[in-house]
Image (tube, rainbow, N blue to C red):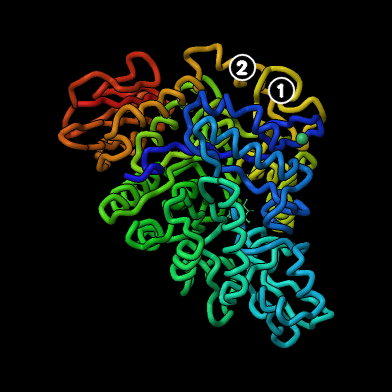
Amino acid sequence: MSNFQSSVVYQIYVKSFYDSNGDGIGDLNGIREKLPYLRKLGVDDIWITPFFPSPMHDNGYDVSDYTAVNPMFGTMEDCEALIAEADALGMGLMFDMVFNHTSWDHAWFRKALEGDPEYMDYYIFRDGVDGRAPTDWIASFGDPAWEYVPSLNKWYLHLFDKSQPDLNWENPKVREELKNVIRFWKAKGVRGFRFDVLNLISKPERFEGEGAGHRYCKDGRHVHEFIRELVADTGIETMVTVGEMASTTLDNCVRYTNPQSHELSMCFNFHHLKVDYKDGDKWALMEPDLVKLRDLFREWQEEMARQGGWSAVFWCNHDQPRIVSRFGDEGAYWKRSAKMLGTFVHLLRGTPYIYQGEELGMTNAHFQSIEEYRDVEAINYYHILLDRGATEEQALAVLAQRARDNGRTPMQWTAGDNAGFTTGTPWIGLPENRAFLNAEAEEADPDSILHYYRNLVQLRKDHPIIARGDIRFLDTGNGKILAYERTLEGRKLTVVCSFSGQPEALRLESSPAGEALVENFPGAVNWETVEPYAAFAVLE
Ligand code: TEU
Ligand code: CA
């Protein structure tokens, strides 16, 4: 049992967490000031999104210097102090390594644009075909995935924004440069790393085909070899490492995370967060398919356990809308549904991640105009939807549910101006519910989502069955009720979660006896009729 298998990780989107100097932008010293809050929540590790120098076209996921601190977020001294203070409180920091691509402002890419052949080979430059791009690939943010450089008469690949040229991992010099970045931050005392879109780094031998470019690059031909080499040569196998794996497969995730592979501690996959994508299209709305959600969790949880893999389990991050708005309820059942969603994830097999504000039940942004949006992906797709014939109202209705900005509004600390996030003007707006939805108010309310999340984190430490137990999903006779059982050394934990806003009939093969280990409201336990958004777990 490695530490990370009984840990809980908290994700901080640095730009929106807490602003310590009144410029409207979250920063490293803001995180330092809130370490006691995180300590009280009980989390073990803290993943901080990139705070390295960047032109911020993709809010820091476009890095121009991997071993420095963006002055917008603070200084290297602030960073070193943050590492030391977190460590003194028993929490480890995980920094976010964006190794699939750099910013076009990175010195390596500037030299490539000057025609330096050594640095052109750090990236993926190709000749066009009959004056056109090498392939008709589309990047994740909706643009063509190749950008033409007239001075070189070449095209470069970018699976994301054109300001994010993909690195050529086939080049051993690139791999060595990135290992040096890991060595630099490891020497500073971080406890682990999150690797951005790590399963896209190994590109195909030939570039062909059309459509979403990442489809041709995911889980590429050398990806496992490259990860093993990076881990071995930097000695990070004993650290906490998590790979973000876009559109990956179960077999690959077993390979990425089974200790015998000597690759990563765990990985994120996103299939469960696409059950409300109509025909697989993020920008086409559909009610969540809960039967598909159950089947995905059943397959991934049971197979990862059977094959010795390890998953990061989560609902939210800085790319996703807020889960209580997505799979829960913002109205009468706001508090109860937020607690249900937390219960479902925190009692699963795997390492749970809490995204900033999730522990408060923070909701989507409810922006009313395109001017309120900040994210390159959302703004691109707003115009793409209009080009496809949507009205402004229709396009805004899609963004209101799908834009990544929904997860990037400032953390709500108090009921005061800007929810206590900043004394300045926040870089992005906030929803109206901060009057009651804030850490200070929830600290004072023993029945709050915050107190409930603290208890969920503590349960993992008190009951080994949660961290170490096997898992089996149960047939509930009802597609809106998800249930599973954890077993360890003769003990059994039965977890029942209703994703429905109505009372629902439950038909389990047996009705466990025993007291509720946790329930999201008094009297939630009922083995015949489950109340709206009820969640409970019974330990025998
Ligand atoms: O995200 C990659 C990724 O899969 C998301 O962009 C996702 O595909 C998209 O948001 C769903 O519509 C990582 C980072 O988490 C993200 O913030 C960056 O924009 C992206 O990589 C490029 O670095
Ligand atoms: Ca600031």
Relative depth, front residue between 478 and 521: 521
Helix or strand or loop: what does disc 1 sit on? helix
- The residue shown at (18%, 22%) is 513
Relative depth, front residue between 180 and 40: 180
The relative height of residue 409 versus residue 398 in the rendered view (above or below) is above
The relative height of residue 450 versus residue 141 in the rendered view (above or below) is above
Helix or strand or loop: what does disc 2 sit on? helix
Residue 221 relative to residue 133: left or right: left
User: Residue 11's spot in the image, x, y percent?
Assistant: 56, 39
Looking at the image, how many numbered discs can be counted on the residues? 2
The residue at the far right in this view is 151
Q: Which residue is mark 2?
A: 440
- The residue shown at (55%, 67%) is 201
Are circles 1 and 2 on residues that touch, CB within 8 Å?
Answer: yes
Residue 14: which numbered mark, if any? none
Amino acid carrying mark 2 in the image: Glu
> Label 1 neighbourhood size at 10 Å, few (<14), some (14-19), many (20+)?
many
